[in-house]
Amino acid sequence: MQRYPYLSGREVFLPDDQLIVTKTDLKGRITYANQTFLAFCGYTKKQVLGAPHNIVRHPHMPRCVFKLLWDRLGAGEEVFANVVNLAANGDHYWVFAHVTPSRTSSDGIVVGYHSNRRSVDRNAVEKAIIPLYADLLKEEQSHADPKHGLEASTKMLSDRLARMERTYDEYVFSI
C-alpha cells in the first residue's frame, strides 16, 4: 500500500449517528476494525488487520499530537483528540477520537488500545483546530532534522496549552 496516496482535497463527513471503532495491539497494529472504519478509510479488512493504524494518517496531521497521544496512552491514560484521517483514495475526514488502553480483566495489564471516533464540531475544527495544527506542522517542517521538529512542535503545543491553563483534552472540549 502506498504511504500517502494522491490527496484529492475532497472531504467526506462522518454522520452524527455513526461511530468508527478500531482496536490495536501495543505496537499500534490494527486487530479489529468496524465496517464504518472500513467504509471511510477505503481499505478492506484484509488490508488493515495487522497493518499499523497510521495507515490512515493524513500528512497534514502534526506528529506532536500523536506524540501526546502515545505518551498519555503509555501512562495508562485515555486521550481525546481531533484528528484528520486519510482514505485510500486520497479523500480526508475529520473525527473526534477517544482512545483508551485496553486492559485484561484479571490484573489490569494493558494489552492494546481501543479507539472510538465520532463526527466533529465543524466550527471548532475550522476556527481552532485547523489553524493550530497548521502552526504545529509548520514548526515541525521548519527543522531539517525530524526529531528536532517534533521536539519544537511539542514545546509549541505545550506552551500554548500552558498559556491557556488547559490540558489538551480540556482545550478540545472547550472549543
Image (spheres, helix red, strand yellow):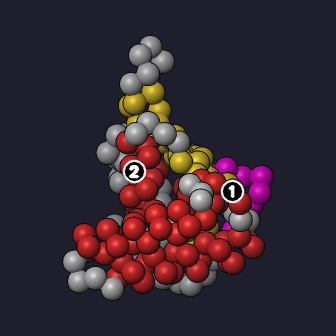
Image position of 117 (left or right of 106): right
The outermost residue toward the left is: 145
Q: Which residue is mark 2?
A: 70
Q: Amino acid at mark 2?
A: Trp
Q: Which mark is residue 57?
A: none
Q: Amino acid at mark 1?
A: Phe
Q: Residue 96 location, x and y as percent? A: 63, 58
Please indicate, yes or no, whether residue 30 appears anywhere in the rendered image. Answer: no
Q: Residue 149 location, x and y as percent? A: 31, 75
Q: Mark 1 or mark 2, which is nearer to you?
A: 1
Q: Which mark is residue 173?
A: 1
Question: Image quadrant for the N terminus?
Answer: bottom left
Find residue 125 and report its image quarter.
bottom right
Residue numbers of the magenta segment: 13-20
In depth, the one of 24 and 154 nearer the eye is 154
Q: Is residue 142 above or below residue 94?
A: below
Give the mark, 1 or 2, whose residue is nearer the N terminus. Answer: 2
In depth, the one of 142 and 59 nearer the eye is 142
Q: Residue at x 63, y 60 (%)?
A: 171
Q: Is residue 147 above or below residue 26?
A: below
Q: Residue at x 44, y 72 (%)?
A: 156
Q: Residue at x 39, y 25 (%)?
A: 109
Q: Residue at x 47, y 32 (%)?
A: 102
Q: Residue 9 location, x and y as percent? A: 56, 84
Q: Residue 117 location, x and y as percent? A: 62, 52
Q: Is residue 56 magenta?
A: no
Q: Is residue 156 above or below residue 21?
A: below
Residue at mark 1 to residue at mark 2: CA–CA distance: 19 Å
Please indicate, yes or no, whether residue 142 appears anywhere in the rendered image. Answer: yes
Secondary structure state at the residue bearing disc 1: helix
Q: Residues within 10 Å of mark 1 (few under 14, many from 20)?
A: few
Count of numbered circles on the image: 2
